[in-house]
Image (spheres, rainbow, N blue to C red):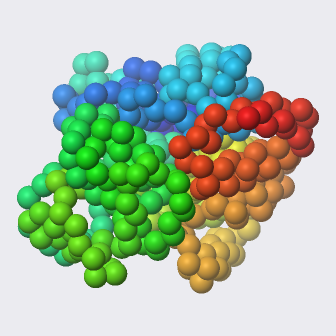
Amino acid sequence: MRRVAVLGAGPSGLVAARYLKDAGFEVTVYERLHHVGGTWNYTDETWMAEDGRPIYSSMYQNLLVNLPKEIMAFPDFPFHDIEESYVPSKEIWKYYNNFCDSFDLRKLIKFHHHVENVRPCDSGWLVTVTDLTNMVEHSSEFDAVVVCTGQCWCPLYPNVEGSNNFRGRQTHAHTYRNPDSFRNRRVLVVGAGPSGHELALIISYVAKQVFLSRRELKIVEGLFPDNVTEKPLLTSLTEYTAYFSDGSSIDIDDILYCTGYRFRFPFLSPECGIIADEKRVHPLYMHVLNINNPTMGFIGVPPAACFSVLFDLQAQLFTAVLTGRCNLPDAETMRKEEEEELERQLAAGFQPHFMANRQWKYFKQLEDMAGAKPVPLYYMKMFDDVVFDWAKDLQHFRRNNYRIIDNENYKKIY
């Protein structure tokens, strides 16, 4: 086994290419843009590019990261020298470019190449791409393929009664770029995850009034400015009015859905044996390996995790499987373990791949299977610290800075 295709040159694709290259594989990375960094490449464009293909980036103007740079960095590649812990998106983009060049990955990347189709073939996998510089389509055979195309590009909307009757604007966080269009308007933000909180706060600085709808109403005093009101689950809409599960209603001008994304891999042929539902990709062993053919892997499927660690360890697992350092159970055992994991997730009230507090146990499993170095303990400590600060002091938590002391400890500077 020699040739491996990496689909995407965002963070997950870069770290996958790094480990595969280091293991001696002949690596080809296909990237639709002319830059590395994936969603960290800002564009004013939304929905569709000029060539009729989707816009994959959900990046908006003036974004400040919601995790300290100290744990956004891959475990063995520190962030470049900059004082603040919470940095603008352009610094993250710079970091991934530094990573790319430090491991000499750029020469592996075919920029301006859009993946059209992946299907099994006698030698492994047939990958068909379009060279966007001349619009010529061509195919190449690979022994293995790893999907690193990101999950934040195909919006997921809730099924709200009367949404077709609403006469105001309805948009999704995927197309949000700046708050200007919401100036002096009454805005309903639907969804109270990180993006819902963040965009409700940003929009509140220019809007007349902002309402944040969440499935379970948990009001924290002082979390938002005075012109933000938290509401329970949105149940229905009429021409200008939103109705909620507690029987209340409000008149609004705009709705911004921060309701996440569906899994979608339109380039995978049915013969690949992968099913992508709204919230689940299966059959996947350890959220990474195609159980029907483990020479196909996926990096970055689970949400709600420390993504630098997630990408790094999943890439190491996939590489270990290809090199033979990691011996997998038989397919029947892998399917059984996948189903048992799904049952535990659903019983706990979580989506199939959702991580959050489960991530640290999962990372330890990946370390053991891949023979990877243990992740420094400060990643877990700092991540949990930040989640607490974010939930209690959304407006000011980015004022904190962090300094790493050793593999276990850090100093928090207020």
Percent across and percent down for residue 360 are 76, 58
Q: Nearer the viewer, residue 231 or 370?
A: 231
Compared with residue 349, is residue 229 higher up or lower down, i.e. above or below?
above
Compared with residue 162, is residue 97 higher up or lower down, i.e. above or below?
above
Residue 353 seen by the camera? yes
Percent across and percent down for residue 6 are 53, 37
The N terminus - image quarter: top right
Residue 217 falls left or right of residue 337: left
Percent across and percent down for residue 14 are 59, 31
How many numbered circles does the render carry? 0
The residue positioned farthest toward the front in the image shown:
226
Residue in the image at 40% along x and 52% along y? 226
Residue 256 seen by the camera? no
The C terminus - image quarter: top right
Q: Nearer the viewer, residue 396 or 87?
A: 396
Residue in the image at 61% along x and 55% along y? 392
Residue in the image at 38% along x and 29% along y? 61
Percent across and percent down for residue 105 are 60, 21
Residue 376 falls left or right of residue 353: right
Residue in the image at 17% along x and 54% along y? 253
